[in-house]
Amino acid sequence: MVTRKRCSECRKTFTPSPRAGSTQRVCGAKCRATRDRDLARARRRSDLDAHRSDECERQQTCRRKRAEAAREEGSGGARHAPASAAKSLETQDEFVEIVVRLSKASRATIVRVRSLKRLPARKILATG
């Protein structure tokens, strides 16, 4: 006679594997993953300090392995490009000059110059 059990996750009935016997609690892989996740969460919650120290150790190991791999590759692997050079003072002075020129011009002048030259606003600011 085949005994049927109820899955602890989805509550559907299933026939347990003959090899698992009375220990099988879930019906399949999806419910197994859900159950494992819930059990792990409960285990971490019950001993939070141990979980934090384990996680810290795991991260340190991972970082150490990545650093070793980067050293073996030579140039440092897939790191970011170096920072770009700072904007020169000349560029900043040009910007200030453009703003001053625009503040002196009226809105009508700016619109007229743009429509006559059919230039993008960036070039109108430079030509004044």
Image: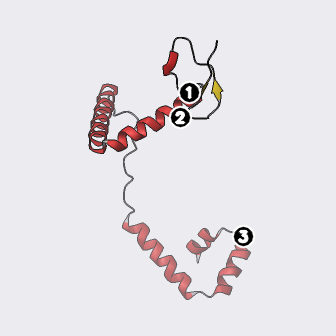
Name the residue carrying label 3.
Answer: 118
Quadrant that contains the C terminus: bottom right
Q: Position of residue 33 (x, y in %)?
A: 52, 31
Q: How many marks?
A: 3
**25 relative position to 45: left or right:** right
Secondary structure under the numbered disc 1 in the rendered image: loop
Between marks 1 and 2 in the image, the one whose residue lies nearer the viewer? 1
Classify residue 62 by image quadrant.
Answer: top left
Q: Position of residue 116 (x, y in %)?
A: 73, 76
Up-down: is 70 above or below 42? Answer: above
Query: Tag 3: residue type?
Result: Arg
**58 relative position to 92: left or right:** left
Give me the residue at 62% from left, 21% from top.
4
Give me the residue at 39% from left, 53% from top.
84
Badge number at residue 34: 2
Residue closest to the eye, 118 or 1: 1
